[in-house]
Image (spheres, grey):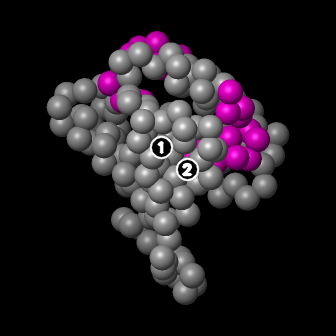
């Protein structure tokens, strides 16, 4: 199955990671590739303890405008996804891949080519602004819609809720 979690609301990565925990509970192999992210978050600390492979290709800073470094890291992330897909994990999560596509750091065509090679691997793609072609290709699409967020009131990210 190809699953897409997109939209401007909170919960895209969280939903994907919840599915990773479910799969691990059934002794399934899970691999996570994170685009545009780097850091030790609560979930990455737990995943390392659980033996979930997680690869990060990003800067510590939130990316508003992409740099050459961001482009190079996104290309490496996509290459790693192709490489890890050959291991035929039960679940491959491409976290924030939609953002990388939207920012022009990787090509949608290359991501679709990866999905076509999935065979028995289920793939989850997260991030805002999922392209329509990807939405059409997917088996399941969920849009997280922001109704209200405490960020809008000037409250910063909270450890344990956002990271």
Left or right of residue 123: residue 76: right
* Foreground pick, 149 / 31: 149
The label on residue 4 is 1
Q: Residue at x 66, y 25 (%)?
A: 110
Q: SS for tag 2?
A: loop
Q: Name above or below for residue 11 compared with residue 154.
A: above
| Crowding at mark 1 (Cα within 10 Å: few <14, some 14-19, many 20+) | many
Measured as percent of width and height from the top left, residue 12 is found at: 45, 54
Label 2 neighbourhood size at 10 Å, few (<14), some (14-19), many (20+)?
A: many
Q: Earlier in the sequence, mark 2 or mark 1?
A: 1
Whole-percent x, y for residue 18 in the image: 31, 48
**The C terminus lies in which quarter of the figure?**
bottom left
Identified at 76% across, 41% down, the residue is 104
Which residue sits furthest right?
Answer: 68
Would residue 80 be seen by someone viewing this image from the given angle?
no
Q: Are marks 2 and 1 in contact (CB under 8 Å)?
A: no
Task: Determine the secondary structure under disc 1.
Answer: strand
Of residue 60 and residue 3, the one placed in the foreground of this image is 3
Among the 4 quarters of the image, the one containing residue 28 = top left
- Quadrant into which the N terminus falls: top left
- In the displayed structure, 4 sits above or below 24; it is below
* Residue closest to the far left: 26
Give the side of residue 32 with respect to residue 82, left or right: left
Whether residue 117 is visible, yes or no, is yes
| Residue 76 horizontal/vertical position (percent) | 65, 27
Cα–Cα gap, marks 2 and 1: 8 Å
Question: Badge 2 is on which residue?
Answer: 127
Badge nearest the viewer, 2 or 1: 1
Range of magenta residues: 83-109
Instruction: Name the residue furthest front.
Output: 136
Q: Is residue 65 magenta?
A: no
């Amino acid at each position: 199955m190809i699953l897409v979690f997109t939209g401007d609301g909170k919960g895209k990565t969280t939903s994907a990671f919840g599915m990773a925990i479910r799969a691990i509970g059934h002794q399934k192999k899970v691999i996570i590739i994170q685009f545009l992210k780097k850091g030790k978050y609560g979930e990455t600390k737990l995943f390392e303890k659980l033996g979930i492979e997680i690869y990060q290709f990003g800067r510590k800073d939130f990316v508003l405008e992409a740099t050459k470094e961001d482009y190079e890291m996104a290309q490496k992330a996509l290459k790693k996804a192709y490489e890890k897909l050959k291991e035929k994990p039960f679940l491959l999560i491409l976290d924030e891949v939609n953002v990388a596509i939207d920012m022009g750091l990787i090509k949608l065509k290359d991501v679709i080519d990866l999905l076509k090679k999935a065979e028995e691997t289920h793939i989850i793609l997260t991030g805002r602004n999922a392209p329509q072609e990807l939405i059409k290709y997917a088996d399941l699409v969920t849009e997280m819609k922001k109704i209200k967020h405490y960020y809008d009131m000037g409250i910063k990210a909270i450890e344990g809720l956002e990271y």
